[in-house]
Image: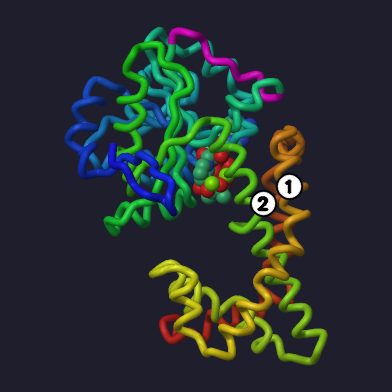
Amino acid sequence: MAKIDFGGIIEEVVTRQEFTLDKAREVLKDEVIAVIGYGVQGPAQALNLRDNGFKVIIGQRDGGKSWDKAIADGFVPGETLFPIAEAAAKGTMIKYLLSDAAQMMLWPVIKENLNEGDCLYFSHGFSIVYKEQTKIVPPENVDVILVAPKGSGTNVRRNFLDGSGINSSFAVFQDATGRAMDRCMAMGIAIGSGYLFPTTFQNEVYSDLTGERGVLMGCLAGVMEAQYNLLRKNGHSPSEAFNETVEELTQSLIRLVAENGMDWMFGNCSTTAQRGALDWAPRFRDAVVPVFDQLYESVTSGEETRISLESNSQPDYAEKLQVELDAIKNSEMWRAGAAVRSLRPENQGK
Ligand SMILES: NC(=O)C1=CN([C@@H]2O[C@H](COP(=O)(O)OP(=O)(O)OC[C@H]3O[C@@H](n4cnc5c(N)ncnc54)[C@H](O)[C@@H]3O)[C@@H](O)[C@H]2O)C=CC1
Ligand SMILES: CC(=O)[C@](C)(O)C(=O)O
Ligand SMILES: [Mg+2]
Ligand SMILES: [Mg+2]
């Protein structure tokens, strides 16, 4: 593994140069890879694996949108697309990519179709770490591994196709065969990860549940809404409020952060902006520290898991989530956003 200095701390990571795709193909050459679940991560990982020459079958409850999506992507019922139990029985590497709530609900089906020496694969530490709630305790005769892409499945696929890839964390929870780590690193490269950084199931799920409720999704949406509402309350137009809150960030400034860090983005803004941002950043940081402390406690205590399992186990969970997403979409802020996006030169005339 490559030793990398991350801000003064040396960590070991796996790169494509040292764990090549050919090495991954050698490690996985006798595996039948069964992707269970064809929602967001399932398609991305399955298509990337297939494009990389691996034998992939899909397990999905038949008749729904995801089943049809798998057929549209070229998986053939009875040949490479099966009901969940059949795919799990055929597979030697079972990629458990149902929703986290569904993993809990379908675990008896998966467990009864695991064979000695199989490998049970997760892309989130959720099911294993919160076993008191999920009741997911794998048999001792199988490997249990994690490869968690740090990005949406949509970008796992898009970035694979453009050659960039998404970084993934990886971990081994149980090594029954003595080959779990090799299987884990090989699968991480095989699904198209940019590079792999080591973690544990617990650290992955604690950080991931925090990140998606925090800066990556929940906190981001909340601070954007707060600033938009402030500007509108003080007489700024919807277009001015949205451009100053979202469009300039996504089309300019966050891209500079991605390119070369926060100081680079600051340094490419006015000195007026730099002074102000440097003065206010600590105030915003200190204001949210108590909220982040509450969030992390709610994650580690299992309360976030309880809330998620309770809501996402309901038969109508998808419809209820869609109602809340539609409320965002239909808000003035995001209707203004749709208009702003439509005015982008690349969207003119569409
Ligand atoms: N969405 C993402 O981009 C990421 C997801 N992950 C992890 O990957 C795994 C899969 O996540 P997603 O693809 O987002 O899952 P998802 O929420 O899209 O669901 C995947 C599949 O589960 C099926 N499903 C849902 N409820 C079911 C039920 N009661 N019975 C049978 N099938 C059911 C859905 O039809 C869907 O095809 C999870 O562990 C998640 O935490 C990790 C990183 C990013
Ligand atoms: C895309 C991702 O990494 C998330 C936000 O953790 C998720 O979808 O669970
Ligand atoms: Mg994540
Ligand atoms: Mg997540």
The residue indicated by pointer 2 is: 213
Three-letter amino acid code of the residue under disc 1: Leu
Q: Reply yes or no: does residue 137 show up in magenta.
A: yes
Q: Nearer the viewer, residue 48 or 136?
A: 136
Q: Residue furthest front?
A: 8
What whole-number distance in Å separates the C-alpha atoms at marks 2 and 1?
Answer: 8 Å
Query: How has the structure been colored for display?
Result: rainbow
**Mark 2 and mark 1 residues within 8 Å of each other at the beta carbon:** yes
Is residue 210 something one can see in this rendering?
yes
Q: Residue at x 73, y 33 (%)?
A: 302
Q: Residue at x 60, y 84 (%)?
A: 275
Quarter of the view holding residue 288: bottom right
Q: Secondary structure at mark 2?
A: helix
**Which contiguous range is marked in magenta?**
133-141
Question: 225 or 264, which is in the foreground?
Answer: 264
Residue bearing mark 1: 295
Q: Amino acid at mark 2?
A: Arg
Circle 1: element type: helix
Q: Quadrant of the N terminus?
A: top left
